[in-house]
């Protein structure tokens, strides 16, 4: 007669439970080093910022607990409300405008079969490689009263349009925003070119046999095919727009007045110039929450449209 199975095999003895426990904990051991680094350099500083935001502190003397007072001040302070409004405007210049331009530009390049496409990709992506400080200094010279832009306007008889672009209350914000558009358009275009390269040519051939034109192909084939790439591009550019600092610092320092100040610049100014560390932490935490909610909304909308 065959031997009866051991009790540990049928009822799950200590050996079986140990093996099962080992298989359960092994994946966590692999991710533990990365999680430790993430906790040390991301989660702990974020938690520390939240803690500091509950105090009124100048960075030197004893802190005073104020609860959510720093957060209510964000709503009451006109300068801070304007800063968040400017950040919303930058979403248009950094994200929406480049995505629109990049989508059309990538579609034209893809369908036109440009021979020098690799070279064009390098050139259009170049602003992403150059340090933002260098970009800021270059565009500051372009926008200067005697800079390239005003010189070009004078040369074609439009001297009436010349101005100190970065010193004008009405034009400073759009001028800085267009620099962000120039930087972001290359990234968006390269991402979308990669997505469009995966579209089967048979789809375009079938559409043409059905009598579809270029515009119909764009909306019926290209746009749905690159929805994932558009989501990635929007996520990256929106995050960049909301946390931009170096561009503002190097071009206008939030001026003239406070017409170009943004939350990230206010964090720097309050923490290192005016000694309002608690207020700076509250602004930083609020900005982090806003970035998280906007990126979450973008990804949810993309998933529903898929």
Image (cartoon, rainbow, N blue to C red):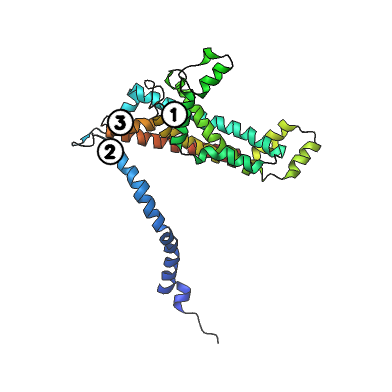
Image spot of residue 305 (x, y percent): 60, 38
Nearer-N-terminus badge (2/3): 2
Q: Which residue is mark 3?
A: 270
- Element type where label 3 sits in the image: helix
**Secondary structure beneath disc 1?**
helix
In this picture, residue 268 sits left or right of residue 16: left
Q: Residue at x 62, y 44 (%)?
A: 194
Q: Going from the N terminus, do you reach mark 1 or mark 2 first?
A: 2
Q: Earlier in the sequence, mark 3 or mark 1?
A: 1
- The residue labelled by disc 1 is 87
Residue 130: image location, x then y, percent:
49, 39
Is 214 situated above or below 202? above
Of 129 and 266, which appears nearest the observer? 129
Question: Where on the picture, by quarter, is residue 86?
Answer: top left
- Residue ID for mark 2: 52
Which residue lies at the image location 40% right of the left edge and 31% below the top edge?
Answer: 250
Q: Residue at x 28, y 38 (%)?
A: 52
Residue 295 x %, y %: 48, 38
Circles 1 and 2: CB atoms closer than 8 Å: no
Residue 161 shows in this picture: yes
Marks 3 & 1, CB-CB < 8 Å contact:
no
Q: Residues within 10 Å of mark 3 (few under 14, many from 20)?
A: some
Instruction: Say if residue 89 shows up in the picture.
Output: no
């Amino acid at each position: 007669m065959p031997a009866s199975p051991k009790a540990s095999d049928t009822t799950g003895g200590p050996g079986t439970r140990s093996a099962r426990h080992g298989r359960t904990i092994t994946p966590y051991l692999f991710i533990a080093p990365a999680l430790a680094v993430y906790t040390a350099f991301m989660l702990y500083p974020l938690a520390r910022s939240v803690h500091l935001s509950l105090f009124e502190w100048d960075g030197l003397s004893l802190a005073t607990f104020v609860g959510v007072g720093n957060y209510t001040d964000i709503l009451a302070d006109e300068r801070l409300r304007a800063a968040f409004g400017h950040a919303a405007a930058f979403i248009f210049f950094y994200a929406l405008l480049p995505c629109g331009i990049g989508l059309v530009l990538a579609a034209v390049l893809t369908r036109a079969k440009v021979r020098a496409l690799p070279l064009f990709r390098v050139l259009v992506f170049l602003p992403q490689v150059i340090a933002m400080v260098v970009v800021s200094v270059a565009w500051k010279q372009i926008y200067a009263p005697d800079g390239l832009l005003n010189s070009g306007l004078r040369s074609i008889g439009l001297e009436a349009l010349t101005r100190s672009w970065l010193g004008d209350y009405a034009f400073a914000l759009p001028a800085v925003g267009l620099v962000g558009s120039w930087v972001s358009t290359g990234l968006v275009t390269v991402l979308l070119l990669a997505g469009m390269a995966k579209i089967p040519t048979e789809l375009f051939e079938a559409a043409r046999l059905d009598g579809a034109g270029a515009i119909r192909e764009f909306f019926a084939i290209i746009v749905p095919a690159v929805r994932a790439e558009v989501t990635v591009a929007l996520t990256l550019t929106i995050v960049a727009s909301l946390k931009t600092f170096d561009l503002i610092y190097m071009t206008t320092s939030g001026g003239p007045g406070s017409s170009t100040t943004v939350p990230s610049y206010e964090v720097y100014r309050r923490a290192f110039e005016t000694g309002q560390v608690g207020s700076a932490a509250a602004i930083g935490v609020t900005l982090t929450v806003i970035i998280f909610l906007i990126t979450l909304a973008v990804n949810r909308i993309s998933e529903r449209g898929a």
